[in-house]
Image (tube, rainbow, N blue to C red):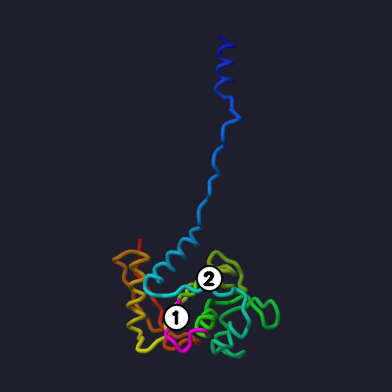
Amino acid sequence: FETAKRQAAISSEQTDVTLPGYAPSPGRLHLTTLTLRKICRIFYGMGFDILESPEIESDNYNFEMLNMPPHHPARDMWDTFYLTESVLLRTHTSPGQIHAMLPKAPEPLRVVLPGRVYRYEAVTARSEFMFYQVEGLAVGTNITLAHLKGLLENFARRMFGPKQRIRLRGSSFPFTEPSVEVDMDCIL
């Protein structure tokens, strides 16, 4: 009985090496990638082009052409990774605005600029030296803050659910005028 039991166990545990193997698992996209793609799909559905611009930029594109000369206060907000004296890792996705506007000018433009940005900061539980930013730009005639509010409400509802509400608060940023911040009600 012991011999028969042992033979049965050996037979049941044998692997037929001539059979095809298991297909490898293809993996999944990272949550950040999925979120960025969803954001871009929403804006694309609202008529925006999607533009990915270079992560390595010249000082000219990252600051100067955005109206931030060497002593502009907005430059103090970012600790920049300079690769050479005039080449850097972009501190925001705004240089993409220049890349988008130069070939289109003076035509109207609606573009979203997603991507990684870099700032020389201490890594903490709250911040990293690299993070993702998504920025939109609409250039045309008769565009108002009311259009921006409607666009952001539409985005919030498509991204987080049909009952989402937002509010715009006047704010002050040294590089935009007028400036607003957007709050959304809690989704939990």
Q: Which residue is mark 2?
A: 115
Give the Cα separation between the discs numbered 1 and 2: 14 Å
Check the image and name the residue furthest to the top: 1
Question: Quarter of the image holding residue 165?
Answer: bottom left
Q: Is residue 88 left or right of residue 92?
A: right
> Residue at left 58%, top 85%?
63
- Tell me the crowding category of disc 1: few under 14, some 14 to 19, or many 20 or more residues within 10 angstroms, Cα based: some
Residue lying farthest to the right in this orientation: 84
Q: Is residue 106 magenta?
A: yes
Tag 2, which secondary structure? Answer: strand
User: Does residue 34 appear left or right of residue 70 in this picture?
Assistant: left
**Above or below 167: residue 25:** above
Q: Quadrant of the C terminus?
A: bottom left
Compared with 107, 50 (above or below) is above
Any magenta on residue 94? no
Which element is circle 1 on? strand
Q: Which residue is mark 1?
A: 137
Which residue sits at x=35%, y=66%?
Answer: 158
Q: Is residue 184 above or below residue 8?
A: below
Residues shaded magenta: 103-111
- Residue sitting at 54 percent across and 77 percent down? 92
Could you tell which of marks 1 and 2 lies nearer the N-terminus? 2
* Residue 143 x/y as whole percent: 36, 86
Q: Position of residue 182 (x, y in %)?
A: 39, 76
Q: Amino acid at mark 2?
A: Gly
Please tell me in which quadrant of the rendered image residue 7 appears: top right
Q: Looking at the image, which residue sits at the far left?
A: 163
Type of residue at label 1? Leu
